[in-house]
Image (cartoon, grey):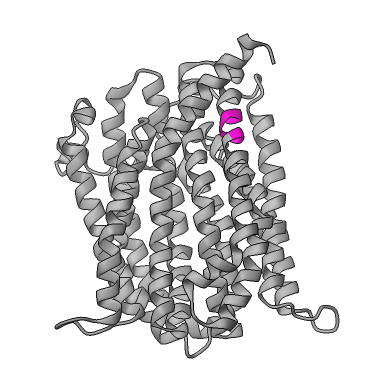
């Protein structure tokens, strides 16, 4: 590659890496929350670990659409910032806060109802009480979580990702002692097992949201945006047009995120039919895989911002594709490292979670399957992030549904649970083969979609009316 062409790419790589670093660290801290819950639950007992696995699966199944919907904020904010329209960011953010609050209340109600759905789902009877207790505890933190995501996505869209990292690890420092205390009990505190872990998570989520709001209000970096000015006054009441504008971009993202996330979550629920050992082993393997995923996920979010910023500045197809290529190169590097770590250390990693030999053996096997999907998982999330930067969300939603639910789930369910007269049940390994297939198809389809959407004659207008329902 000629030096003149290489220099812009190297500069883009540096910018994306610097933006990604705190995002990756913040996501890793989020993944470590699941790690902490799983390790505490695993040492409390195999039944507790299985209950936390099912409870966590149901929690994130409900959380996917609200979380994805709020992902409309970073590309909208980054395009306004890139186009020099910072004065429009504050009003947009205040409308996003109203949307986040409504989503949080709706999600609290949904989690209260999901407790009653476990028996019809076929979740093993010994798992249901603990999973219900976990959901009853963590649901109190849901409104805080949606508000936190709203504030985080605003900050990320303005290329300031340090708060995501600091608050992520700060929450982790609170969760570890609080989770141990409420799960096992202590002086004057009864041990609540899985329910205690759910309640500890809720307390941590509210602490993070309150501290983030205080920081945004006090920081000089955001002072010119006047983010909370007059939030509860009549002039800042919910604006239907602006909220619909956010939903038009965000809902397809939410559905796309749900298509992928629910593939993993429904897999966990189907394995929940097989008993506590397969569930516990799957929880260990999926938690490690989720930790690995946090790295390309952070790079993908940075790529969303960089692509959106390039589009807002009017750099055309060359600038947009350069931003995506930088993210792709970083992702391929991170996935190589995670794949090697899983290949060489799967036995040792499984032993960290549990003293149950049967659970450790099966989870170590599943970690090898997790190794196999590192590259397709990284490519699909990076491609989806780049497409979000272009606000191209509707077609990717359809492609994700096809990959995950047209290929991944039918294949995984057929191999894992068996097909009478045709396929003998393989158990959890069969389900994981379905995960690999779904992610591989998604990587191909979403990658090709970005190549098409970023062509010079197909790019959207450099400055879109992102603050309105238009």
- Image coordinates of residue 125 in percent, x first then y, are 49, 90
Which residue does the image show at 46% across and 70% down from the upper left? Answer: 58
- Image coordinates of residue 183 in percent, x first then y, are 30, 78
* Image vertical order of residue 362 relative to residue 103, above or below: below
- The residue at the far top in this view is 4
* Image vertical order of residue 188 relative to residue 336, above or below: below
* Image vertical order of residue 131 relative to residue 439, above or below: below
Quarter assignment of residue 140: bottom left
- The residue at the far right in this view is 422
Q: Is residue 212 left or right of residue 20?
A: left
- Pick the front one: 363 or 264: 363
- Range covered by the magenta-colored residues: 324-329
Q: Is residue 85 left or right of residue 181?
A: right
- Pick the front one: 314 or 301: 301
- Image coordinates of residue 406 in percent, x first then y, are 71, 59
Q: Quadrant of the N terminus?
A: top right
Q: Is residue 403 left or right of residue 176?
A: right
Q: Does 190 appear in magenta?
A: no
- The residue at the far bottom in this view is 125
Quarter assignment of residue 242: top left
Q: Is residue 238 left or right of residue 18?
A: left
Q: Does 328 appear in magenta?
A: yes
Which residue does the image show at 48% across and 81% down from the upper left? Answer: 118
Quarter assignment of residue 465: top left
* Residue 176 in sight in this render: yes
- Our reading of the magenta stretch's main secondary structure is helix
Which residue does the image show at 40% across and 19% down from the upper left? Answer: 83
């Amino acid at each position: 590659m000629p030096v003149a062409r290489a220099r812009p790419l190297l500069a883009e790589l540096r910018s994306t890496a610097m933006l990604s670093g705190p995002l990756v660290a913040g996501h890793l801290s989020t993944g470590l929350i699941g790690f902490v819950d799983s390790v505490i639950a695993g040492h409390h007992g195999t039944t507790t670990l299985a209950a936390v696995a099912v409870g966590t699966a149901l929690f994130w199944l409900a959380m996917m659409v609200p979380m994805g919907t709020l992902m409309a904020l970073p590309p909208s904010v980054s395009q306004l910032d890139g186009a020099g329209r910072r004065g429009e960011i504050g009003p947009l953010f205040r409308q996003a806060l109203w949307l986040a609050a409504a989503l949080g209340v709706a999600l609290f109600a949904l989690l209260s109802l999901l407790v009653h759905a476990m028996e019809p789902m076929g979740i093993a009877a010994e798992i249901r009480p603990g999973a219900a207790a976990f959901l009853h505890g963590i649901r109190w933190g849901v409104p805080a979580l949606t508000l936190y995501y709203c504030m985080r996505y605003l900050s990320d869209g303005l290329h300031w990702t340090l708060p995501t990292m600091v608050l992520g690890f700060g929450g982790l420092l609170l969760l570890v002692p609080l989770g141990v205390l409420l799960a096992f009990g202590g002086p004057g505190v009864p041990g609540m097992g899985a329910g205690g872990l759910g309640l500890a998570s809720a307390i941590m989520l509210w602490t993070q949201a309150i501290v983030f709001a205080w920081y945004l209000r006090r920081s000089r970096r955001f002072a010119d945006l006047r983010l909370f000015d007059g939030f509860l006054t009549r002039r800042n009441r919910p604006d239907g047009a602006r909220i619909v504008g956010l939903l038009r971009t965000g809902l397809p993202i939410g559905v796309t995120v749900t298509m992928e996330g629910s593939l993993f979550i429904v897999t966990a629920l189907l394995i929940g039919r097989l008993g506590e050992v397969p569930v516990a082993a799957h929880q260990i393997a999926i938690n490690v895989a989720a930790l690995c995923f946090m790295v390309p996920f952070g790079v993908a979010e940075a790529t969303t911002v960089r692509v959106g910023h390039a589009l807002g500045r009017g750099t055309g197809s060359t600038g947009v594709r350069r931003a995506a290529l930088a993210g792709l190169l970083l992702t391929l590097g991170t996935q190589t490292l995670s794949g090697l770590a899983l290949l060489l250390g799967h036995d040792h990693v499984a032993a960290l979670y549990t003293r149950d030999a049967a659970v450790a053996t099966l989870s170590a096997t599943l970690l090898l399957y997790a190794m196999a999907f590192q590259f397709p998982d990284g490519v699909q999330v990076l491609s989806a992030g780049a497409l979000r930067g272009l606000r191209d969300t509707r077609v990717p939603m359809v492609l994700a549904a096809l990959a995950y639910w047209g290929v991944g789930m039918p294949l995984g369910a057929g191999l894992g649970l068996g097909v009478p007269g045709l396929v003998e049940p393989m158990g959890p390994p069969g389900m994981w083969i379905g995960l690999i297939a779904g992610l591989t198809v998604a990587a191909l389809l979403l990658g090709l979609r970005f190549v098409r959407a970023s062509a010079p004659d197909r790019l959207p207008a450099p400055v879109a009316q992102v603050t309105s329902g238009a």
